[in-house]
Amino acid sequence: MLNLLFSILSSGVIFALFKLAEIKKVDNVRIIIINYLTASILGFSLNRIDPSLANTIHSNWLFLAIFIGVMFIGMFFLIGYSAQKAGISVTTVSTKMSVVVPILFSILYDPQDKISLIKALGIGLALVALFLSVYKKRTEKLEMKFVFLPVILFFGMGLVDSFVKFAQQDYLDDNNLPMFTAFTFAGALFTGLIVLAVLRYPIKNFLSIKAWVIGILLGSANFGSMYFLVRALEYGNFASSAVFGINNIGIVSVSVFLALLFFKERLKPINWIGILVAVMAIWILSTA
């Protein structure tokens, strides 16, 4: 349970740091790159196994880790593009509702993860809670030619979590988890650096103390989010489908309360209803 709680709190901190970066006028590109650098270093520093290159190259999880890392940063850029073209509200809902993909994957792939009426009710309530919690009246007009962007995000974000579940199920344990996480974030880092090189992003933009402070904190939270999620899937008291459901609605709930406490954001009644439904869903999933 502690691993799941730490994963939720880490992800909630990620939201707060992105909001802080917006307030401090630090662009996301810088802190994202610094974040992946920090997360990679944390993974390598916590490694308990032989760190030799030959040993790593022959690891059966290496390609999967790098692939997930590339998807990480690819989805990040796609979120930004979708928010601009398809609208922030539609993009937010599609990313949050993508949890249905790893939930279904876990039920189908994990022999220990069995569906039941109570669990199905909890998962259904979790999806309703996610939608209501992040719902905002759409003010921007959705251009139908860009409707494919949130659809890609829905499946893309869902596949990222599904691949993490696949890796946890077949390849990971306490010994290689830090190294797997390190190479996942390293894959995201080098992909991002290649994109920046192609776009000729000015190196001088990284000469900012604020960017490095926020980026390092973000990287630490990002590492914790993934590290503790995998441990929750491996050692938690809940089935994987329940873990994904509790994790996502927990992240939304923590993010909402951080926004209320530190950034004075206001919620609509429908969002409060979503939070109440989320509490019900967490209780049902934790007892399923």
Image (cartoon, rainbow, N blue to C red):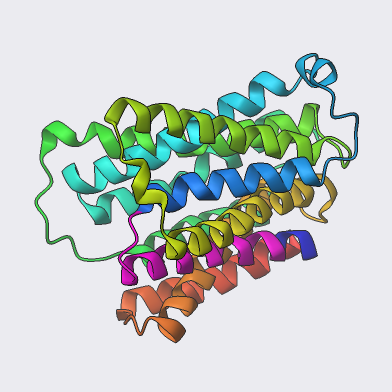
Q: Residue at x 26, y 56 (%)?
A: 89
Tell whether 260 sits left or right of 45.
Answer: left
Q: How many marks?
A: 0
Magenta stretch encompasses residue 182: no
Q: For the N terminus, which image quadrant?
A: bottom right
What residue sits 83% from the left and 40% below the top? 47
In the depicted view, which residue is nearer to us: 74 or 238? 74
Q: In this picture, is 190 found above or below 264?
A: above
Give the position of the C terminus as an image quadrant. Answer: bottom right
Q: Residue at (62%, 62%) from the top-left corner?
A: 10
Q: Position of residue 219 (x, y in %)?
A: 58, 53
Q: Give how far across and how far down residue 203 sits, in percent.
A: 37, 41
Residue 272 vs residue 17, the one in the foreground: 17
Considering only vertical position in the picture, is 262 above or below 47? below
Q: Is residue 119 above or below residue 64?
A: below
Q: Is residue 40 left or right of residue 141?
A: right
The one of 124 and 258 positioned closer to us in this rendering? 258
Tell me the residue at 26%/66% (across/down): 136
Choose top left, top right, bottom left or bottom right for residue 57.
top right
277 relative position to 24: left or right: right
Percent position of residue 111, x then y = 79, 32
Work out whether residue 94 or residue 42 is closer to the camera in this orientation and state it.
42
Q: Dominant secondary structure of the magenta stretch?
A: helix
In the rendered structure, the answer to whether residue 243 lies left or right of residue 36 reads right
Range of magenta residues: 5-27
Taking the image as drawn, is residue 83 in sight?
A: yes
